[in-house]
Structures are given as structure tokens and as C-alpha cells.
Image (cartoon, rainbow, N blue to C red):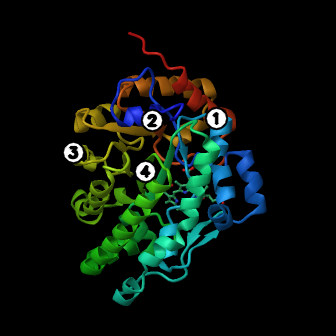
Amino acid sequence: MLKNDLLLQALRGESLERPPVWMMRQAGRYLKEYQALRAKYDFFTRVKNPDLASDITIQPIDSLDMDAAILFSDILVIPQAMGLEVQMIENKGPFLPKTIQNKADIDALKINEAVKNLHFVFDAITVSKEKLNNRVPLIGFAGAPFTILCYMIEGKGSKNFDKAKAFCFTKRELAHELLQKITKLTILYLKEQIKSGVDVVQIFDSWSGLLSPADFNEFSETYLLQISNELSDLAPIILFPKGSWYALEKLSHSKASAIGIDWTISAKFARECTQNRITIQGNYDPCKLYQAPDLIKKDVHQLISDFGKDKLIVNLGHGILPDIPLKNAKAFVNAVKTYKETR
Ligand code: CP3
């Protein structure tokens, strides 16, 4: 039994004294313990060695005591397992030397073998669960099919992912073939993560906000719904379609347990669109963690009163930045823990 299951309670929509808190990218560079391992091992060594990956997963729990751990891994292990080379270039980000361009490239992508190639993730989950020793739930994750397509076509990070969007609009059929293939693997992958012990899964659609509402329906939502329909009986799901404010109403009727939102969406708008049908996760601007701790505390208490303490998971609106002082990250977590409703 979990000693702290606030996250699971919030995902079930139960009324709580205070909401749970965790931070996207909480296992990462703002922690000196992470930097120490980063100096010794390259990125995919850290990801693929279950002992290292699980140590990194636990680091933020040991030093900041959030209400959930998230597995240290990356969304790009999916294209890698399907057969594409993925490099992580120091201070620049991901690079895929060979991108997807045509039908032959899509046909060459593996699915069944890919699940086997991902066994290091399932091992890292098993070891992380042991090391967590039931302190808090463990969140597993995958990239949303549209976001994975973005990297597979573009080959690297991009401001607008023009090439990836152009592929969707000019080679519509091929784009759907690719999205469907990624979706199929993602479902198998997440089912295996759940079997290995994750308590919750989050789907990161980091680039869905680049799409118009109609294009989101076609290229992203279709596949997000397939994934939630397949998994919702197995574990609670958090969908994070970053920037897609227009998707809130429709996704609030989906089988997901929560929707993640970024800081461009107000509490009032989010609650109006979702009518308390679903838990909301978010949405503090990660840049505001540069402010002094007392200001962070004030903001977090305001955020909780704006959303209401129930059906809320306090988080950032995107990942924590690498140079945030530890005391500021602590102020964020502690502000949630000291929240008391004042009536
Ligand atoms: O949240 C966590 O603490 C768990 C670990 C996690 C990582 N990546 C580790 C990581 C998670 C959940 C991800 C997801 C991920 N990876 C996303 C979706 C979320 C988002 O941020 O939009 C995306 C788009 C990626 C792809 C990716 N990985 C990029 C663009 C980069 C480089 C940019 C950057 O932030 O450095 C990575 C590298 C990466 N993934 C790092 C970490 C800790 C930094 C690399 C390092 O420490 O050397």
C-alpha cells in the first residue's frame, strides 16, 4: 500500500485537504545529485541503465519530497526502439540523423521488436518501485503520437516544426499511417509500463499547440483518445496537450483522469470548459520559479484558490528549467503542502 496516495485520490476526484504536487522534469539538471551523474555518464547511458535511471527518479523525492515520482527516461526512446538513431547533443537537444520521409521509411519502423528493445524502461520501473518503497506513486509516460511524429520528421527540436506540419498537410495518408503505427507501439509500451508497476501514466503532447483546432482533432486527438480508451481500465491517465486550450472541453469527456494545462490558460477558463468533470494539472509558469521564495509561495496559494483545492494537481505548465535554485523549487513544493483553505 502506498503511504502517500494523494495523487491517486486527486485523479479519482476525491476531496482532499490539499492538492498533490509534482513538477514536470523534476528529475533533472537543477539537482546537483543529477549533475554529478550527468558528468560521469552520457544521456542514454543514464536512461538505459536501470540502476542509474531509478536513482535519478528517486533524487527529487529524497530532496524535495513531492507527492509523486516520474520515471527518468525520455519520450524519444520510442523512435529509437522503432529503429531510428537518436542522439542527445550536449546543450542542444535531440538529433535524428535519418528522418522519416516516405512510405518505405514508415514500413521499416518496427513494432514487436521495439517493445523488446524497451525492456530497460520496464526494468527501471521495477527497480524504481523497489527504491521508492511505497513512499509515493510512480508516474510512467510516453510522448503523444503527434509530438513523436514531429521529431521523426523534423529530426530535431524546432520552434514551429514546419516540416512535420507540412508532412501532415501534404502527405495526409502517410502521416496517418505513421501516427497509427506510433499509437500501436505506444499502447503496447504503456501497457507494459503499467504491468511493471507504474501507478499513473502521462502522455506528453508538447507540440500539439502548434495545430489549429481542426488539425488537432485530426492529427492528435484521434490518437490520444485511442490511447486513453485502451488504457483507462488499467491505470489513471493524464493527457498533456500543451497549448491546446481548445481541446479542454472535448477531452474532459474522454476516459482520461486528468488534463494538464500550461500557464496561458486561466483557472476560470479551464474550469468553465471542463465543468469539474475532470481533474486539472498545472499550470505555474516555470519562469516564475526565478522569483524569490516568498513570492512563489504567494503565487502558489493564489493558484490553488483560483482553481479550488479539489480536482487539482499542482504542477508547472511545462518542465522545470535547469538553472532554477533548489530553494525556489522547494518553496514551490512546500507552498502546496502548507496550503490551508481559508473560508
Ligand atoms: O519529468 C521528468 O523528470 C522525467 C524525465 C523526462 C525527461 N524527458 C528527461 C530529460 C521526461 C518526462 C522527458 C519528456 C520529454 N523529452 C519531452 C516531453 C516534455 C517536454 O519537455 O515537452 C520532450 C519533448 C523530450 C525530448 C527532449 N529530451 C528534449 C527536447 C531534450 C533536450 C532539451 C532539454 O531540456 O535539455 C531532452 C533531453 C532530456 N530529457 C533531459 C532530461 C533530464 C536533459 C538532458 C541532460 O540532462 O543532459
What crowding class fits label 3: few (fewer than 14 Cα within 10 Å), some (14-19), or many (20 or more)? few
Q: Which residue is mark 2?
A: 7
Gap between marks 4 and 2 measured at Cα = 12 Å
Residue 289: % across, % down:
58, 37
Amino acid on which disc 3 is placed:
His
- Image depth: mark 3 or mark 2 in front: 2
Amino acid on which disc 4 is placed:
Val
Q: Secondary structure at mark 2?
A: helix
Which of marks 2 and 4 precedes in the sequence? 2
Residue nearest the observer in this picture, 11 or 271: 11
- Image depth: mark 1 or mark 2 in front: 2
Gap between marks 3 and 2 measured at Cα = 20 Å
Which of marks 1 and 3 precedes in the sequence? 1
Q: Which residue is mark 3?
A: 253
Do residues under tags 3 and 2 come within 8 Å of each other at their CB atoms? no
Q: Which mark is residue 243?
A: none
Q: Which mark is residue 64?
A: 1
Gap between marks 3 and 1 measured at Cα = 34 Å
Q: Which mark is residue 201?
A: 4
Amino acid on which disc 1 is placed:
Leu
